[in-house]
Amino acid sequence: MKRVVRTWKRTSLIKKIAIGVSIGILLGLVFPSFHLIGLLGQLFVGGLKAIAPLLVFALVAQAISHQKANQKTHMSLIVILYVLATFAAAFVAVLVNYLFPLTLKLEKAASAELKPPQGIVEVFQNLFLKLVDNPISALASANYLGILFWALLFGFALRTSTKEIKGLVKASAEVTSQLVVWLIHLAPFGIMGLVFSTIADNGIGILKSYAYLILVLVGTISFLALVINPLISFIVMRKNPYPLVLTCLRESGITAFFTRSSAANIPVNLRLCEKLGLDKDTYAVSIPLGATINMGGAAVTINILTLAAANTFGIEVDFLSAILLSFVAAISACGASGVSGGSLLLVPLACSLFGIPNDLAMQVVGVGFIVGVIQDSCETALNSSTDVLFTAVAENAFWLEKPTR
């Protein structure tokens, strides 16, 4: 037994996760009614979601309070990369529609409880209201825009405080980070439970009738992850981006694929940034911000499902209208919540551009939830892994010096 424990400790986290995935698939096929295994996945995701708001607040407040005068963090470049990549994703989805036009089988309606936004104005209104949310409420509800806003204010206020108080803030950030380290070590067991639940609840063949839609969605997301984002990275860094791209996909994308939540993957991304040796003052802000506005995968989902709906109802979409849709999708995607299925509720908003009524658009959302077992996992893997990717790319831009640590 001691030998097994020693071997397990020496094994890399990625290999442990691969073992967990394999065992989860096997148990889901052989013992689909043994739901106690699935509880491990719920506990793992619940733990990540619980600690992430505290971690973000502690790290951002600590980073700002200890920031030196004139210290460069390259946040403006990171935000530009986030926005550029999100629009590029929306535009690629438009091109994919012309190459591989889709139609949908609208057999199931979405739940009546879902309430999509009624327009761009509502999306922006919700975003701004999140900024001034009660800080305690923001922490409790994992409102990361609110958490970032209040953490920044607390950080700036703490700049004039004593060394003792700054030391206490730093200690709280370190303690919270250590809790995250312990939690991430449980990832193989948590992901095993998540995979078990997916296989046990849905089976292997439930998605056959939507295979073409899934193939187009996954293919588009893969093209973005392996071609478009590396191209953007190469332009900024002027060196081979693929070692960094593959590291982000392997160590961030895999966990995001199974948790299906950008918010839950924030602790994983922060640990990866630390492992990559990035500037803490930068990634403490860019990672939670990316979980909110870096939504290339969401833009793909919104555009492909909206254009598929237009094809289904015989609505001709000219190229200029498709470009307008890309802008709407990119802006709306920034308002998608960092939780499972957040992008789907923005499909009715995009459908309204082509006169598709809300009741029909909600049926499209229903299809989205059916394929969400695969679509949302791939979408989240792309979104979350590129948070780390563009943070690292900005720090290694060829025309900039690395920030002083």
Image (tube, rainbow, N blue to C red):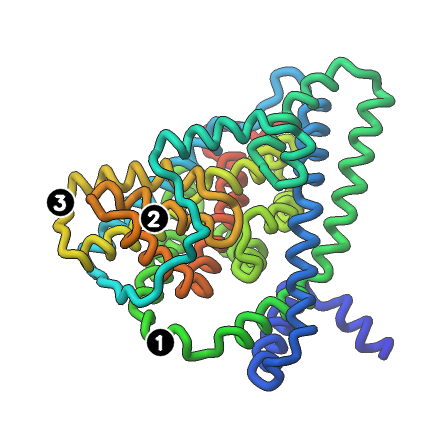
Furthest toward the top, the residue is 160
Residue 268 is situated, as x and y percent measured from the top left of the image, at 63, 50
Asked if the residues shown at circle 1 and circle 3 are in contact, with their CB atoms under 8 angstroms apart, the answer is no
Of callouts 2 and 1, the N-terminal one = 1
Q: Which of marks 2 and 3 is in front?
A: 2
Q: How crowded is mark 2: few (under 14 residues within 10 Å), some or many (20 or more)?
A: many
Residue type pointed to by label 1: Lys
Q: Which of 26 and 205 is in front in this view?
A: 205
Is residue 148 or residue 33 the one in the foreground? 33
Residue 145 is left or right of residue 330, and the answer is right
From mark 1 to mark 3, how far is it between C-alphas? 31 Å
User: Disc number at residue 318?
Assistant: 3
The correct choice, above or below, for 210 with respect to 169 in the image is: below
Disc marking residue 103: none
Q: Mark 2 points at which residue?
A: 347
Q: Which of marks 2 and 1 is in front?
A: 2
Q: Name the residue under label 1.
A: 208
Give yes or no for contact between labels 2 and 1 (Cβ–Cβ under 8 Å). Answer: no
- Where is residue 155, by image quadrant? top right
